[in-house]
Amino acid sequence: LIDAIQAQSGTVPGKGACGGDFNNLDPQMLRDLGFTELQINAHLDYHFDVPAERLTANLGFDLSQIESVQMSVELDGVVPLDVARQGASIPGLASAEMSVAVSRNFGDRYMQLCAKRANTTVDAFRKQLIERLHGELAQGGITLGAGLRRAMEDLYRDWGEMRINLRPAEPLGPMQFLQISPLNAVDTLGLSMRINDRLVTDLSFDLDMQALLAKAQIQAGQEPSNLPSPELPKRVRITRDYVGVPVTALQEHVGAAVRIKPLGQPERSGTLTSI
């Protein structure tokens, strides 16, 4: 498979592949990392609960000894096509989850090899890589806040799993997604993130709407417009903070990220599953 990849892509041995994208490793690098073959396992399954009008789909792949990606989506209000009505209902997103897990052994060897290629130390290369990734995000209009920057640093140092969850208070349809204000997107979507099971409590980031639109235009094969967008602010800051709630209101926050301090016990944080 490695030889086939190189023959098909015309990859020059030993060039590139140190940009942090493990799905774009050149064949020579794979050999240098000790791989003689690649094993990929993929799965796709779904369950349609007709009485509840709920569809759950799961998709994942595992690139053995390198990384695995798992995704799950739950849609509510899914009604089979009713020919008599000449249409179908529009489902809403009830929840979504994505996890990306990178092998620690592979991650460490990857950093060592890339640092050697760049004639620098592992720590120096890691810092350069993270700054490069931040630069690419900034070009697309996204600037991560302190919490997300720290989460990225932890992931590229310790490797392991990053898990992202979307759990809105009620299912969101396509038009509702378009109407979400960037200022409250985190809370509206019920967004949470964990790095190696550690909850990332600061999900703040900045959006440069003009840069975001320009990148979207480029990806669509259009020339980016220099005209201002009066209906969109140029930059918004998205933050998520904990707010105090009475014990009697906890039932309303099942499924949300919470921080609780029981009397006489240490503070705990996580996802509230039940009361």
Image (cartoon, rainbow, N blue to C red):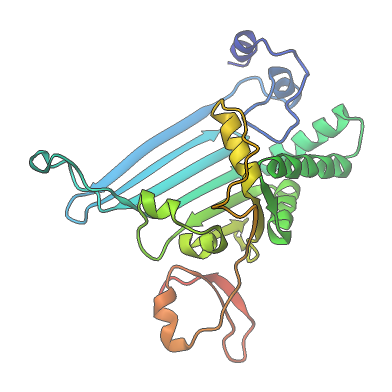
The quarter of the image holding the C terminus is bottom left
Q: Where, by quadrant of the figure, is residue 214 drawn?
A: top right
Residue 98: x and y, percent?
50, 48
Looking at this rendering, what residue extends furthest in the left direction?
84
Say which of 275 and 175 sits in front: 175
Residue, x 31% and y 42% (percent of image)?
46
Q: Where, by quadrant of the figure, is residue 121 drawn?
A: top right
Residue 14: x and y, percent?
78, 18
Whether residue 32 sits left or right of residue 43 in the image: it is right
Picture mark count = 0
Residue 74: x and y, percent?
35, 51
Looking at this rendering, what residue extends furthest in the bottom direction?
264
Q: Does the rendering let one see residue 146?
A: yes
Check the image and report above or below for 16 versus 260.
above
Say which of 36 and 197 sits in front: 197
Say which of 237 and 49 sits in front: 237
Residue, x 57% and y 52% (percent of image)?
232
The quarter of the image holding the N terminus is top right
Whether residue 8 sits left or right of residue 189 in the image: it is right
Residue 244: x and y, percent?
55, 83
Residue, x 57% and y 87% (percent of image)?
262
Q: Does the rendering let one see residue 102?
A: no
Whether residue 165 sits left or right of residue 233 in the image: it is left
Residue, x 18% and y 50% (percent of image)?
50
